[in-house]
Amino acid sequence: MNKIVSKEKFSENVTKLVVEAPLIAKARRAGHFVIVRCGEKGERIPLTIADSDVKAGTITLVIQAVGDSTRKICALEPGDSLTDVVGPLGQATKIKNYGTVVCCGGGVGVAPLLPIIRALKEAGNRVVSVLCGRTKDLIILEKEVRESSDDVIIMTDDGSYGKKGISTAGVEEVIQREKVDYCVTIGPAIMMKFVSLLTKKYEIPTEASLNAIMVDGTGMCGACRVTVGGRTRFVCVEGPEFDAHQIDFDELLMRLRG
Amino acid sequence: MENNYNESRNEQWRVELRNSISPKDRAAIERVEMPQLDPSYRITCNEEVNQGISEEQAVREATRCLDCNNPQCVTGCPVGIDIPKFIKNIERRQFADAAAALKETSSLPAVCGRVCPQEKQCESKCIRLKMKQPAVAIGYLERFAADWQRNSGTEETVKMAPKNGIKVAVIGSGPSGLSFAGDMAKKGFDVTVFEALHEIGGVLKYGIPEFRLPNAVVDHEIEGLRKMGVDFQKDILVGKTITYDDLHDMGFKGIFVGSGAGFPRFMNIPGENLKGVMSSNEYLTRINLMQAGRGGDTPVLQGETVAVVGGGNTAMDSTRTALRMGAKRVILVYRRGESEMPARLEEIGHAKEEGVELMTLHNPVEYTGDENGRVCTMKVQRMELGEPDASGRRSPVPVEGAIDEIPVDLVIVAVGVSPNELVPRSIEGLEVSRRGTIVVNDESMQSNISDLYAGGDIVRGGATVILAMGDGRKAAQNMAEQLLAK
């Protein structure tokens, strides 16, 4: 059992939970995820770790309520507990000084992007973050992202905040004004697909973090398989990040559709 | 192993019991048949198919055992159970003593009595076979004694050595880990088992279905280990949550890796990533561990026409699970013939009784999907048997041009598993084979790192529950000697 220490509602469907998990807090690196379960009959849900506090022994998770299980998790209050939290899972992000890096996060994908932004900044990169959402309320963690970014561009589909337009417009703006050496993108699969197509055109190496369907999260079930460079890979153990230009996004989108 | 089968055989009561009935009269008794649920009923529910034999049947079956002078059955048992000792205790109706005799060597008799391939092990060595008669039903008797103990409500008597204060860690709570844990606890060690999943039991929980091995049976055996002082820590993935070095810092002097072969194999054919094509691991885990379709929150795809690819026990479990999930037609597609199937005969028989269609000498070559990306047909290549391959089985060869297309809406791929490299890869300097298995000394189960032992599928790459348990037992014996010699 892992106790909820605090809770913050970012928007109607997006909730931040700080959860007791001392071993994971200590072991995790940017890019890692956990699997959580809520209730004795609960589903195993993969969630990327947004932050951790080794001293307090906590990790931060940002959850978007999209189905029954995520709604149940979002309904938890401080003092309640998650039945299980296991991790950190997956491979950590490869952090080094690339030069200038564009970090493009869409919706709740900004949460797992935050530790990557921080680590890239710490490694000496110039970090330009592009945060995207359908509308103003869905832009999350802006303050935290600004703290570790050299520049931040905000894009909303409806123009209610920042610039009006989709993620690719924001990324292309950066590419056209300065030399970009590397790109990281986390968000809805459809967004990552188009960011990837864009950076491919400009030949900018790009990593995408995939949110595949999983059961165990340790390589056992194969539900998370994705085709990368023509080869089937398991997101849970070999990912969640892959070379975006090699990912078969259409297959991923098809597999994610219920 | 440490057993002295003659010592128990020469006890006064055994001699008297042996002489009370002539071998001829014993030989005249026919082998018991396992009472089973009716196929038409059992596919509507999840109840255990084999109902277990009654006390009277057990005593009568035990009487069939000739209590040989040089029992061969014991040589067929990977953990070296004193088989005649437990059987003769059943014959004299000392059922608790029979159960205790099992527990001396096996941590999971109620499990082994159900899932061991006895016909290839202990029973294959039974003297009655040489007499052209069916072997003594050792597996049924093992299950009977273990079930009797569980249902009697009495406390088990397990001989425990005094605590020695030495801490040992087990990675993985499947059959090899549980067997190791039980033996080490009995030898006085302080045992902690680390499990990555949220349930203890490994493949016994996520893999083998309820109708073949009820979870309550597994839980009872685990509870027994808890009572012996074994500590279980779930949701901990060694190599990720804590490292091998952390285990040393935590004071563990010996480590046993029984992390299993959890990596499902696929065939790398077109359309294999369509929705509705999944590994047997995924299908069975969703249903067995996560209770999909049985009140759990986890979903599982349903199919009207389900194809299962493979010929092993996992393939059989998948076909029979699909029937119970409501499939109208279940087809088992296997590239060799029925007699080449690695599954137990009993499992093949049960599947056929339940209505599973066998499509042998066929191999899938492609799947096609509908407009939503859901699998809708399967192309199968007809095969014929050619020359024997390395496994001694005749290898399947494609019949040129003979390709059929069958409509399916769910495909379960059960063509084997590879070792899960997650744990071995996290331990620096550990010798791992090209296949990804941990390399150990066959006799001691010790790896190239002196305090690290391993067993089960992470060493074998894909075997049975009982072989995994045998490994755990051997590792315990050798690690205990190593640690106590210090």
Image: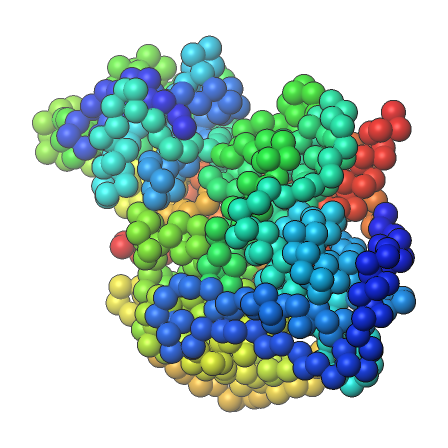
Q: Is residue A105 left or right of residue B350?
A: left
Residue nearest the viewer, comparing B446 with A237: B446
Q: Is residue A256 left or right of residue B60?
A: left
Point out residue B313 in the picture as x, y percentages from the top left corner: 57, 67
Residue located 73% across and 71% down the image: B63
Residue located 61% across and 61% down the image: B143
Q: Is residue B407 left or right of residue B94?
A: left
Residue located 19% across and 33% down the image: A13
Residue nearest the viewer, comparing B17 with B204: B17
Point out residue B2 in the picture as x, y percentages from the top left corner: 86, 47
Residue nearest the viewer, comparing B81 with A8: B81
The correct choice, above or below, for B327 with respect to B400 in the image is: above
Q: Quadrant of residue B93?
A: bottom right
Point out residue B266 in the picture as x, y percentages from the top left corner: 53, 62
The correct choice, above or below, for B357 with respect to A26 in the image is: below
Q: Is residue B77 visible?
A: no
Q: Quadrant of residue B124?
A: bottom right
Point out residue B237 in the picture as x, y percentages from the top left corner: 55, 35
The correct choice, above or below, for B259 with respect to A182 in the image is: below
Residue nearest the viewer, comparing B358 with B74: B74
